[in-house]
Image (tube, rainbow, N blue to C red):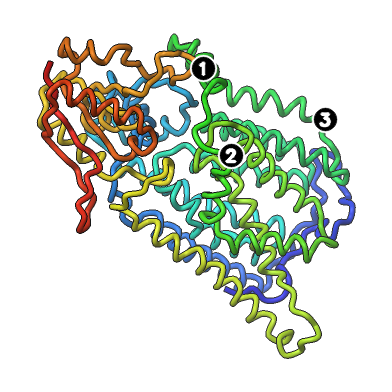
């Protein structure tokens, strides 16, 4: 990959000058000249490099993809997709409508018509992840040129943060794909000022919200960008045209709920989200996300902004707004999740790629200055390698005792669920420490399960979960037949773990199955007890 010189194409406004914006609906961009043999060769070389990057992105996302079973969120979204497809195994255990819109689940549903499915669902998410890597290339080309597009695609391809999330059946990977297309459409609108690109931006943002409704905060990124960029004409009138497009696309979600007779579902989840207690300390993102993104990526992106600050333009403002709004919102939001800041990954790799491609070499060192292309290429290799090693380590993490929600599957969960499906009577009811393991048991075990930690207060629980108001009475009445203890839920809630084990001892719990981590210590991670009144 060549990273010599300046970006191969310097778009208008690169040096901060006011953009001569044509009237909406009119494209004054001159027709491209007939490509010369050298230009054609460079284009094919770039496509060849992009294909190699896509192959690398596919490999790291697909490696040992099925080593672990689903985690709780994966089980929920896969269960929704299966219920939507009419799979009889899941229809009674997973309601179709829960907290989020159903675009991604609808895409998954054809793969979940019968039986137990997990690998196919993850493969669909891998495809979304690789598609996002490919989408970063035209975004980088539009903003800074072909070299930046290639380097940005390479960094995203091996970024542990993006790789980990796009190996799981979560909403965030597909949501970032649509968000990247939204950003691309907005860039095209700014450069050409054509109404069609602004309407496309609104439509793509609607699809992004249909994947995960929290992405509505990206509308704040668009607003902040337009407010902070005087050189871009504020499209007030055409915004009045674009908003109905956005509303029409997103209206699919509430309309489908209303037609299904679940019009109150969204309100119930909104109340729950507003009154949820914090699940992590304020420093959660600072402790977990920078290392997953890559410290060198952050350093290079910041350094690039500093050494090119005199040539700053609307491009940097747009990318920084796309980063800042989600980061600030989710930092202030009490509920935090490992994958929530993923929309910031795409603009971050574009800024980092720009910094690497324009890496300055001091002129007082002539020998180094003559080797500027080689130094830039070496810098790209160092940053990419700094991501590839932890990425490779992360995708080979099966069997570790530590687990962070949103970072991967749950060791032993699939195996424990399958054991319950094959070794317990139909109609058996399971009690777990919390709802996370209950979801996994429902998905793989096809058994009704209840989490002991689910709050009886409707304001403090997910509306999809039914609390055990009196577990003692349920055990005495033989309404609960098996108890599942898992180390991951126990680590998050020692109180309910001890309460569950107290009930096990009180009702003559007998160990009938144990799942261990692979390794010399044989650490038990899931223990299944049979209980009797």
Q: Quadrant of the N terminus?
A: bottom right
Which mark lies nearer to you, 2 or 1?
2
Percent of width and height locating residue 204: 61, 36
Percent of width and height locating residue 205: 62, 34
Tell me the distance, in whole angstroms, between the alpha carbons under discs 2 and 1.
Answer: 27 Å
Percent of width and height locating residue 357: 68, 69
Percent of width and height locating residue 57: 45, 58
Q: Nearer the viewer, residue 475 or 126?
A: 475
Q: Quadrant of the C terminus?
A: top left
Which mark lies nearer to you, 2 or 3?
2
**Number of marks:** 3
What residue is drawn where x is 64% and y is 34%?
Answer: 332
Q: Nearer the viewer, residue 506 or 19?
A: 506
In the rendered structure, the answer to whether residue 335 lies left or right of residue 422 reads right
Q: Which residue is mark 3?
A: 236
Q: Which residue is mark 1?
A: 266
Give the mark nearest the N terminus, 1 or 3. Answer: 3
The label on residue 254 is: none
Quadrant position of residue 307: bottom right
70 vs 250: above or below: below
Query: Label 2's element?
Result: loop
Give the mark nearest the N terminus, 2 or 1. Answer: 1
**Local crowd size for mark 3, using a 10 Å CA cut-off: few (<14), some (14–19), many (≥20):** few
Query: Label 1's element?
Result: helix
**Local crowd size for mark 2, using a 10 Å CA cut-off: few (<14), some (14–19), many (≥20):** some
What residue is drawn where x is 37% and y is 56%?
Answer: 395
The label on residue 282 is: 2
Tell me the distance, in whole angstroms, between the alpha carbons under discs 1 and 3.
Answer: 31 Å
What residue is drawn where x is 77% and y is 38%?
Answer: 224
Query: Label 3's element?
Result: helix
């Amino acid at each position: 990959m060549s990273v010599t010189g300046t970006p191969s194409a310097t778009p208008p406004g690169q040096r901060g000058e006011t953009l001569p914006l044509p009237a909406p609906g009119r494209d004054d961009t001159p027709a491209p000249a007939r490509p010369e043999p050298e230009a054609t060769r460079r284009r094919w070389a770039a496509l060849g490099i992009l294909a190699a990057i896509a192959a690398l992105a596919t490999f790291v996302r697909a490696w040992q993809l099925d080593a672990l079973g689903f985690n709780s969120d994966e089980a929920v979204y896969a269960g929704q997709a299966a219920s939507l497809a009419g799979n009889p195994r899941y229809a009674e255990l997973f309601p179709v409508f829960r907290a989020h819109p159903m675009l991604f689940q609808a895409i998954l549903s054809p793969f979940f018509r019968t039986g137990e499915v997990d690998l196919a669902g993850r493969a669909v998410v891998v495809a979304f992840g690789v598609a996002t890597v490919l989408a970063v290339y035209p975004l980088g080309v539009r903003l800074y040129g072909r070299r930046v597009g290639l380097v940005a695609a390479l960094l995203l391809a091996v970024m542990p943060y993006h790789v980990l999330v796009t190996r799981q059946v979560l909403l965030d990977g597909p949501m970032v794909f649509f968000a990247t297309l939204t950003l691309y459409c907005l860039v095209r609108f700014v450069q050409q000022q054509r109404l069609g690109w602004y309407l496309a931006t609104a439509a793509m943002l609607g699809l992004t919200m249909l994947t995960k409704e929290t992405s509505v905060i990206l509308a704040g990124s668009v607003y902040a960008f337009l407010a902070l960029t005087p050189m871009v004409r504020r499209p007030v009138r055409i915004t009045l045209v674009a908003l109905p497009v956005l509303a029409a696309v997103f209206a699919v979600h509430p309309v489908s709920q209303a037609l299904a007779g679940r019009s109150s579902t969204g309100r119930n989840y909104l109340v729950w989200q507003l009154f949820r207690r914090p699940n992590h300390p304020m420093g959660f993102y600072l402790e977990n996300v920078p290392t997953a993104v890559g410290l060198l990526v952050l350093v290079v992106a910041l350094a690039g902004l500093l050494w090119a600050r005199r040539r700053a333009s609307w491009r940097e403002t747009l990318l920084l707004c796309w980063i800042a709004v989600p980061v600030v919102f989710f930092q202030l939001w009490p509920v935090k999740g490992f994958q929530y800041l993923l929309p910031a990954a795409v603009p971050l790799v574009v800024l980092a790629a720009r910094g690497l491609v324009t890496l300055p070499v001091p002129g007082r060192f002539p020998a180094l200055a003559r080797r500027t292309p080689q130094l830039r290429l070496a810098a790209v290799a160092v940053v990419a390698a700094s991501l590839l090693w932890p990425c490779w380590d992360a995708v080979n993490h099966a069997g570790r005792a530590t687990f962070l929600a949103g970072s991967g599957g749950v060791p032993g969960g699939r195996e424990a669920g399958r054991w319950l499906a094959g070794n317990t009577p139909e109609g058996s009811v399971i009690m777990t420490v919390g709802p996370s393991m209950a979801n996994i048991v429902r998905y793989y075990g096809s058994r009704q399960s209840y989490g002991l930690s689910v709050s009886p207060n409707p304001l403090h629980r997910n509306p999809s979960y039914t609390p055990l108001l009196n577990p003692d009475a349920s055990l005495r009445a033989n309404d609960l037949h098996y108890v599942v203890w898992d180390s991951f839920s126990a680590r998050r809630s020692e109180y309910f773990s001890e309460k569950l084990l107290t009930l096990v001892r009180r009702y003559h719990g007998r160990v009938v199955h144990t799942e261990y981590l692979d390794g010399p210590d044989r650490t038990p991670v899931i223990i299944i007890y049979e209980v009797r009144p």
